[in-house]
Image (cartoon, rainbow, N blue to C red):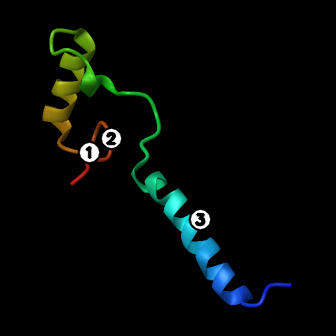
Amino acid sequence: MLRRPVIVLLIAGLGLGAVALPALSLDLGLPGDESKSVKTTQRRAYDLLSEGFGPGFNGPRRS
């Protein structure tokens, strides 16, 4: 048995939290049309939709 199980539990919890910390900034998914060249038809359509319907139409905007 452990002499101080609460301390071991706290240290293990902090260690797991430190390992999981990078997952907070993880972006999942495929790149959208906003990442394409401005010469492509897909990008021009994306820009026209954004202008016509405003921010957030093509996806959530990050602030």
Q: Which residue is mark 1?
A: 56
Compared with 2, 40 (above or below) is above
Disc 3 residue type (three-letter): Leu
Q: Earlier in the sequence, mark 3 or mark 2?
A: 3
Closest to the camera, between mark 3 and mark 2, is 3
User: Residue sitting at 67 percent across and 80 percent down?
Assistant: 8
Marks 2/1 in contact by CB < 8 Å: the verdict is yes
Q: Quadrant of the N terminus?
A: bottom right
Element under label 3? helix
- Residue 11: give x, y in percent of width and height: 60, 76
Element under label 1? loop
Compared with 40, 32 (above or below) is below
Q: Quadrant of the C terminus?
A: bottom left
User: Residue sitting at 72 percent across and 90 percent down?
Assistant: 4
Label 2, residues with CA under 10 Å away: few <14, some 14-19, many ≥20: few
Q: Which residue is mark 2?
A: 59
Marks 3/2 in contact by CB < 8 Å: the verdict is no
Q: Earlier in the sequence, mark 3 or mark 1?
A: 3
Residue at the front extreme, as displayed: 3
Closest to the camera, between mark 3 and mark 1, is 3
Q: Which residue is mark 3?
A: 16
User: Residue sitting at 25 percent across and 27 percent down?
Assistant: 34
Q: On the rendered structure, is 61 left or right of 27?
A: left
- Residue 18: give x, y in percent of width and height: 50, 63
Label 1, residues with CA under 10 Å away: few <14, some 14-19, many ≥20: few
User: Label 3 vs label 2: CA separation?
Assistant: 33 Å
Q: On the rendered structure, is 10 left or right of 34?
A: right
Q: Give 45 or 4, whichever is nearer the viewer.
A: 4
Q: Quadrant of residue 41?
A: top left
Disc 1 residue type (three-letter): Gly
- Residue 17: give x, y in percent of width and height: 53, 66
User: Label 3 vs label 1: CA separation?
Assistant: 35 Å
